[in-house]
Amino acid sequence: MSQLSRRQFLVSAGASAAGAILLKGCSLNPPSPADLSPKAQALSLSPSTTPEITNVKLGYIAIVESAPLIIAKEKGFFDRHGMTNVDVAKQASWGAARDNIEIGSGGGGIDGGQWQMPMPHLISEGLITKGNRKIPMRILAQLNTQGNGIAISNKHIGKGFGVNLAKSGAADYIKDLKQSGTPFKAAYTFPKVNQDFWIRYWLAAAGVDPDNDLDLLAVPASQTVANMRTGTMDGFSTGDPWPDRIVRDKIGFLAVLNGQVWPYHPEEYLAMRNDWIEKHPKATKAILKAVMEAQMWCDDPKNRTELTRILAQRKYFNVPADYLFGPYEGKYKLGDQRQEVLRPELATMYWKDGAGSVSYPYKSHDLWFLTESVRWGFLPKSFMKEADRVINNVNGEKYWREAAQELGIASKEMPKDTSRGVEKFFDGIQFDPTKPEAYLNDVRIKNIKA
């Protein structure tokens, strides 16, 4: 399909309904047909692009990172590329997703889906599986950038929680709570991955030791609001719509967006069992092409209202649509005064952001996640010698490039290198993927183990 015709389709698919749709924020039921733009039209597939199989089971968690999978299903992008029997299955937790990838769809589990990093690497190495069984996986695409934040309970209003905890005095406040015997309790959705890393980086940049100055623990994303409401948690690191819901329900406030800590940071990824990929390479690329088109669709502002109404349904996120609409525009209420700001550059993005490609799975980002794992003692320092091997075994950027070429993506839209280059954080720290040891030397607080 030509680049021009593909773009014409993506534009027309959103434009026909965009002007007529009104945001009905309280609706959790399926949108009416009048609210929806046309579904993607099926392609005439050649033998080289016809998938070997039409069914696959992909898991997801009800946060904005999952949108490309849901939209690929709802808007017909999977069908368009011959994957007519895709089951997009909600997972109760990240632990459940991990368990389900172990058994595969043949055993009632899943073949792949949405993952926090570096879960695919840890599963491949048998580090978080039952009996340390190695289940090789392949990362196929990054699903999104940003869309995460750290919410704080109302009982800490006025204590200085914001981007810079050291400057505001909140860092000392957290340490004082520990000394008084009532430690600050903060949660993430799964240990040793994305959302654990985000809150650790933010705290450590202010001189707060996340391993000693507070209590950190794992809580499923769907339980974040309830736990904050009951007062059992002081803070949460999780994905939209949950931070914004905590603010709207007036049980907490949004202290910081992770996009403020690391602009255009990598978020979650599409990854699948490698045995499934090797058996079905054409189906794998069909899935990738569908997800890529869904990512483009999600990024089109004309589709934003329809996107939020689809995700808001009971079977997906089960929240009012307007809880999603604001964050997709970059509209947040930040700080304990809930000051409304409009920062489009901090919004969730799926296809392109200010740093370039969102969808492409950079190996340099894989390396940061593994390096950060070493920083906190989740992996031994000796693992740095294994990093290249693990990344090359797990990263499937070659599948992304092949799928992009088949889709007609212009070469100028494809990254020229497997590295995005030097990454810059809000505290002045830089991560140069050619010098990961320098990063480990530069960060002040760490728990590196031999």
Image (cartoon, grey):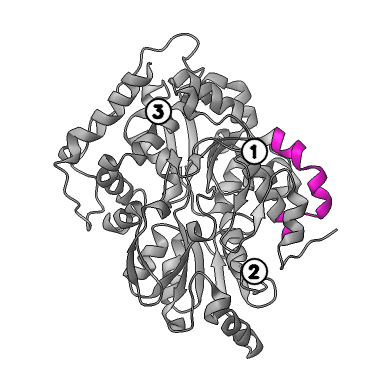
Magenta residue span: 373-392
In the rendered view, tell whether residue 445 sits above or below residue 102.
Answer: below
Extreme residue in the front direction: 428
Sequence-earlier tag: 3 or 2: 3
Extreme residue in the bottom direction: 180
Residue 183 visible: no
Question: Which type of secondary structure does the marked residue at label 2 adopt?
Answer: helix
Q: x and y percent of residue 441 in the render?
A: 77, 59
Sequence-earlier tag: 1 or 3: 3
For the residue marked with disc 3, what is the amino acid? Answer: Phe
The residue singled out by tag 2 in the image is: 204
Q: x and y percent of residue 178 in the render?
A: 64, 84
Q: CA distance from mark 2 to mark 1?
A: 25 Å
The residue singled out by tag 3 in the image is: 78
Question: Which type of secondary structure does the marked residue at label 1 adopt?
Answer: helix
The residue singled out by tag 1 in the image is: 363
